[in-house]
Amino acid sequence: MAKITIPAVNLAFDCADDDTIMRAAVRNGLGFPYECNVGSCGNCKFELLGGEIEHLRQNPPGWSERDLQRKRYLGCQAKPLSDCSIKLNLRDHYKSHILPSKVSGKLIGLEDLTHDIREFRFELDKPVKFLPGQYALLSVPKVEGARAYSMGNITQDGREWHFQIKRVPNGVATSALFDHLAIGDVIGLDGPYGMAYLREEAPRDLLLIAGGSGLSPMISLTRGVAASEKLHSRNVHFFYGGRAARDMCADKVLGSLPEFGKRIHYYPAISMPETEGPQWTGRTGFIHDYVKETFGEKIREMEIYFAGPPAMAEAITRMIVEYKVPTTQVHFDQFY
């Protein structure tokens, strides 16, 4: 076990041999900045002042040769090989309300929601709670490196974590999950992580925007609102975008909630109407345009959560800037 020291704040914490510096810090209740947790975004960079480390991912997208020359490393990928001294700015915003844990999860249920989205339900070997909207790292057998997926359920006892996962064409991890994982199989889980969790104290209605693989956290948030006594008077406006009719399933998942169609409002749209297959008579176009046309300036009055592919996230970010939405009202995790 290595000791990690942050001299600027006279602070030290232990990092287990099988952990990374960032995750160990979060497990110790520290506000170590991060987002994607898989080496893609670069938000967890720190400067190595002393000691030796190695990256779990040899060439992660969020890291460059220039970073190496400046002795800057990714906290989510940095495995210490000795005691280390580091430099970074801790932020209270990143302190976890529920400290993440490494657990094992047994697959107890599968359900196909669309042609390429499947719900995987795991029973944990020990209970770990999470907040609606958070995510976990899945260690899939015979797949190198953990993958980040958001939970789609809510939990009171922390016994089960459910994930609505979209198959990625030629994706190593999703191919393993969809094609080889069977009921009764056990995988490693690590969580919860993420800053896009439900803010029950917020006094505004919720605007949830999901696209494709971003379905799962928005489903969890909606379920969280429905179950929250603090939010019993809040409306949820759930926008879901897909390419074609066969991609749409949010109404199928949310339709069992008593509030669906009452204070939970659903706005589906597809961007590429099919020439074959299921017909679509609803809205077409990009989901962020649907949001703008529906609410316009009222967007500033809402608590906004979103998740989906990069192009969608970039368009929503531009929309948020355009309408001058306060950053404290915007929540998303950049792990695509």
Image (cartoon, helix red, strand yellow):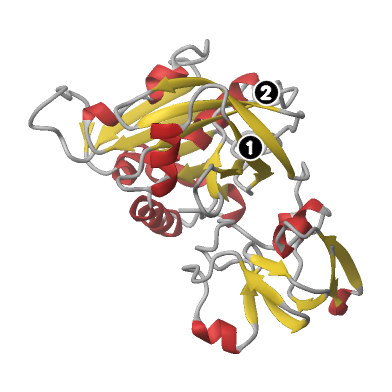
Q: Could you tell whether 191 is left or right of 115 in the image?
A: right
Residue at 48 percent of width and 11 percent of height: 256
- In the rendered view, tell whether residue 27 sits above or below residue 20: above
Mark 2 residue element: loop
| Res 211 visible | no
Question: Is 247 placed left or right of 56 in the picture?
Answer: left
Instruction: Between residue 9 and residue 269, name the one nearer to us.
Output: 9
Residue at 65% across / 36% down in the picture?
203
* Relative to 245, 255 lies left or right: right
Callout 1 environment at 10 Å: few (<14), some (14 to 19), or many (20+)? many
Q: Residue furthest right?
A: 10
Tag 1: amino acid:
Leu
Find the distance from the CA under tag 2 to the CA under tag 1. 10 Å
Residue type indicated by callout 2: Ser
The residue tagged 1 is: 198
Quarter holding residue 196: top right
Find residue 61 and report its horizontal and vertical position in percent. 46, 68
Residue at which label 2 appears: 228
Query: In this view of the protein, can residue 275 be seen by the observer?
Result: yes
Residue at 62% over, 22% down: 233
> Residue 279 location in percent, x, y?
14, 22
